[in-house]
Image: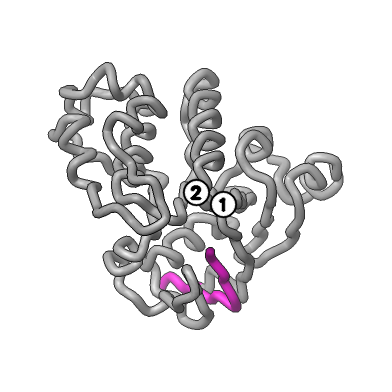
Amino acid sequence: MLTVEGLNSFYGQAHILHDVGFAVGPGEAVVLLGRNGAGKSTVMKSLIGLVQPATGRVQFGGRDVARMEPYRRAQLGLGYVPEERRIFAELTVMENLDVGRQPARDGLRPWTTARLFDLFPNLGAMRQRPGGRMSGGEQQMLTIARTLMGNPRLLLLDEPSEGLSPLIVEQMAAAIRALRQEGLSILLAEQNLHFAAEVATQAVILEGGQVAWTGSVAALQADGATHGRYLAV
């Protein structure tokens, strides 16, 4: 579904990503792990096109999208949920969802508001509430739901558990597991290994903008030395 090779990205003169490479298979959930500043969000922005990589390949569904505009990547089925959420505060839940609507895609069961409210019951109870009058967790759910209205083939989730209460984190984990069962490919950036283990099967650890470790989440959990070295605060 997604293959990244030799990705190098900069902010001005600052070299942030150094030859980053990994892959996400169809229906697979992969987590990018690392401390603050490791480069996780820059990977996400490079994949969707908000940061233009200097070199490297980003193949999505067999097509090299590394030089495409962000809207073209979205049209192809690459969905992006940013760390900052960025809901439309003045629009209602239903209006926010309408903004994200895209046509159904061949081979995929299309997302409808009814299906999304099954996935996120909290949203179904506040359909006419403006986004700005929702809690942080509810806004995160709305951002994911709005992205799903685009019927993505691959979902990019940047720090989906950050700043949320333990109860909402558990609800978020359950929703992501449900998306995996739907066959959706998922790439998420996280610092929370416990949350990552709830939703993903494969892990890529970033350190200083480079891939420091790859393997199964189960193997990482069993390797105290590795997650102590790269993930401990």
In the rendered image, residue 209, in percent from the top left (x then y), is placed at 60, 65
**N-terminal-most mark, 2 or 1:** 1
Magenta region: which residues? 1-14
For residue 189, say whether it is visible: yes
Above/below status of 8 relative to 165: below
Give the residue displayed 32% in from the left and 34% down from the top.
Answer: 142
Q: Are marks 2 and 1 in contact (CB under 8 Å)?
A: yes
Q: Position of residue 107 (x, y in %)?
A: 42, 56
Q: Who's the residue at 39% across and 74% down the image? A: 52
Which residue carries the number 1 mark?
27
Residue at the far bottom: name it.
55
- Name the secondary structure under disc 1: loop
Task: Point out the image quarter for the C terminus.
Answer: top right
Residue behind mark 2: 184
Q: Is residue 215 above or below residue 161?
A: below
Residue 79 rendering spot, x and y as whole percentages: 38, 54
Residue 13 is a magenta residue: yes
